[in-house]
């Protein structure tokens, strides 16, 4: 047992892999060996807060699956276990089981001030947008009329440019809106 861990530390290939995983926060794991190294390094992916890029780090997860999972979570679907994740992705649990050591599933209270539920700025009504703290009626009206005239917003930068909002307003809104 001691010899095994000693030889792993001095295996040049494993050491190189470990360094790559340690230095690249977007490293895409290709094997169960890499998942084991990530586990040793304490790397965790919280599925509840994962981005598409986070999910693409997992071997065998496609861009389509990553997008679907992130969208489900953003719409309020709770993924609280590996079984939930398998069901949401419509893949066998056995395919995800080897990834379990680096996956975490957390519950975040949607009414918490620490993690507020985001409102989709592209679909929200005026009444829904009024739930966003710090947003003025003037900005709500600008958003709605600009959205009707020019279409959906792509991201915060698009919103800022189209409405000519200063950085302070964007800083206040970015925690409460999604696209």
Image (spheres, helix red, strand yellow):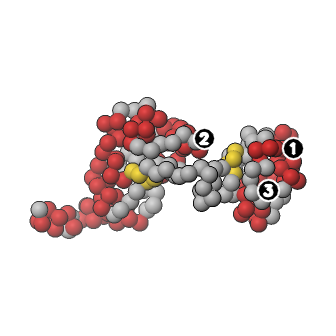
Query: Of discs 2 and 1, which sits in the foreground?
Result: 2
Looking at the rendered image, the quarter that the N terminus falls into is: bottom left
Q: Does 151 sit above or below residue 101?
A: above
Say which residue label 2 marks: 75
Say which residue label 3 marks: 135
Q: Residues within 10 Å of mark 1 (few under 14, many from 20)?
A: few
Q: Does 41 sit above or below residue 156?
A: below
- The answer to whether marks 3 and 2 mark residues whose Cβ atoms lie closer than 8 Å is no
Q: Residue at x 80, y 64 (%)?
A: 166
Tell me residue 178's x, y (percent).
67, 49
Q: Secondary structure at mark 1?
A: helix
Tell me residue 53's x, y (percent).
51, 51
Query: Of discs 3 and 1, which sits in the foreground?
Result: 3
Q: Earlier in the sequence, mark 3 or mark 2?
A: 2
Q: Earlier in the sequence, mark 2 or mark 1?
A: 2
Q: Secondary structure at mark 3?
A: loop
Q: Is residue 75 left or right of residue 98?
A: right
């Amino acid at each position: 047992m001691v010899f095994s861990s000693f030889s792993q530390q001095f295996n040049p290939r494993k050491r190189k892999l470990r360094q790559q995983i340690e230095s690249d926060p977007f490293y895409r794991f290709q094997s169960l060996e890499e998942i084991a190294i990530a586990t040793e390094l304490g790397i965790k992916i919280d599925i509840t807060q994962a981005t598409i890029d986070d999910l693409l780090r997992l071997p065998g997860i496609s861009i389509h699956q990553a997008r679907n999972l992130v969208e489900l979570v953003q719409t309020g679907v709770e993924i609280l276990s590996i079984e939930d994740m398998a069901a949401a992705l419509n893949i066998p649990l056995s395919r995800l089981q080897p990834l379990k050591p680096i996956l975490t599933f957390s519950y975040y209270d949607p009414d918490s001030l620490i993690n507020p539920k985001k409102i989709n700025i592209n679909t929200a009504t005026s009444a829904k947008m009024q739930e966003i703290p710090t947003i003025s009626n003037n900005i709500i009206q600008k958003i709605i009329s600009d959205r009707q005239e020019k279409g959906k917003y792509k991201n915060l930068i698009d919103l800022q440019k189209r409405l000519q909002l200063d950085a302070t307003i964007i800083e206040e809104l970015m925690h409460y809106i999604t696209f």
